[in-house]
Image (tube, grey):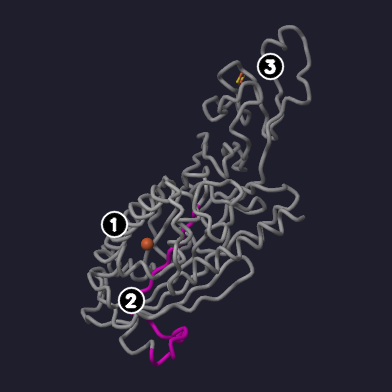
Amino acid sequence: MDIIKGTSADSRLWLHNCWYVAAWSNELTAENLYAIRITNKPVLVYRKHNGQLVAMADQCCHRHMPLSKGRREGDDIRCMYHGLKFNTVGRCIEVPTMKLQGDEVPPAFVVNTYPVAEKHDWIWVWMGEPEKADEALIPPTTGPDDPHWCMHKGHLDYQANYLMINDNLTDLGHIAYTHLNSFAGGRSDAYFNQPRVQKLDRGIRITRWNTDAPRRAYQRSQDSHFDQFMTYDFIVPGVLMMYQGMYTAGTAQASDFGPPPEDLDPDTASFTSQAVTPMTDGTSRYFFSWGPRMSEHQQNPQIVEGMWKLANKAFMEDKLTIEAQQLNVNLQTASPMVSITDDRGPTMFRRVLDTLIREELAS
Ligand code: FES
Ligand SMILES: [Fe+2]
């Protein structure tokens, strides 16, 4: 399987030395045992009583029962199948029946642990070699915990390989059609300008002006004509950080289709952070947030709800599209896919990922 064209389930299509989003910060309470699969591995994440995070294999070393179905005993976890107890570094510290006989726990009774970090309102787990886990590699996004923005957050689970979702998120061409009745406001013709796509070290940058974009219901101004500026970085394994601003019509031209002047106040601006996590070969979790500037929210508290309704409609449109596409891909009809101009983002991102995976395999 080749990552440039691969769209079927295939576990060779992911990077291991990489931070993966496991959860929104608030999905881990002080007490719960949070379970997720990441790159085909069951992972348990929880908070110790001092707030520090623990990530370990969600698989007891005895008969592979998920430890997330067990119980907390202080900061330790007891598997509730036969009672093995594990400390926060994954070491089995008690086997009830062996304890009765006065036997020591063998050193081989351990479960794997993973480097874990909390940043930008997300819990990140490093799935590769622990000594290579570098928090500087966590994409520098803005999360809902940033006081300058007022964002809602959520997630959707997909019956699809994560590369299909990455393709969708790096392709702005689909907005005019997949999102005709949501983001495109009923007007496919407002989205004809091609995006600029630029390669970054661990991802790509996409920038686009949509000139004469339709006004959205949540906008402050009653003018009907806007130039919409969108710019985002998309970083491995599939983390999106996007700024959007609605500017007075003519701004795109005046800015020569580059970034607008920094001191130019848009009618509305929003930020969205999103992340795609491959759970298994054929399932993925899509985390997303979106919202306006806090100052806009304070002037009009309805705005964030209007945006969230729109986003949920649009994200469901993506899910229906991608899952339907995946079902066809699974049939392996051997018909090749053809490429069009809109594919520059997906193709460039897959190349970046391919290079990193090849380097990882070679090292
Ligand atoms: S499977 Fe965990 S104690 Fe047996
Ligand atoms: Fe979409």
Expressed as whole percent of the image width and height from the top left, the position of residue 5 reads 53, 59
Q: Residue at x 52, y 69 (%)?
A: 233
Nearest to the eye among marks 2 and 1: give it. 2
Label 2 lies in ligand 2 vicinity (Cβ under 8 Å): no
- Please name the amino acid that badge 2 sits on: Tyr
Q: Earlier in the sequence, mark 3 or mark 1?
A: 3
**Number of the label disc, if any, that sits on residue 177:** none
The answer to whether mark 3 is within 8 Å of ligand 1 is yes
Q: Which residue is mark 3?
A: 95
Q: Which mark is residue 313?
A: 1
- The residues colored magenta run 253-276
Picture quadrant where residue 47 is located: top right
Mark nearest the camera among 3 and 1 is 1
Report x, y in % for residue 326.
41, 50
Residue 13 in percent (x, y) is at 59, 52
Q: Is mark 1 within 8 Å of ligand 2?
A: no
Q: Secondary structure at mark 2?
A: helix
Q: If the image is split into quadrants, where does the C terminus sit?
A: bottom right
* Residue shown at the point (24%, 70%) measured from the top left: 185
Query: In the picture, residue 298 is in which quadrant?
Result: bottom left
Mark 2 — residue?
191
Which residue is at 60% across, 30% downward? Answer: 59
Q: Is residue 363 above or below residue 258?
A: above
Is residue 206 covered in magenta?
Answer: no
Q: Earlier in the sequence, mark 2 or mark 1?
A: 2
Circle count = 3
Secondary element under disc 1, as helix, strand or loop, is: helix
| Residue 260 included in the magenta stretch of the image | yes
Who comes first in sequence, dot 3 or dot 2? Answer: 3
Q: CA distance from mark 3 to mark 2?
A: 63 Å
Answer few, some or many: residues within 10 Å of disc 2's Cα (few below 14, many 20 plus, some between 14 and 19).
Answer: many
Q: Quadrant of ligand 2?
A: bottom left
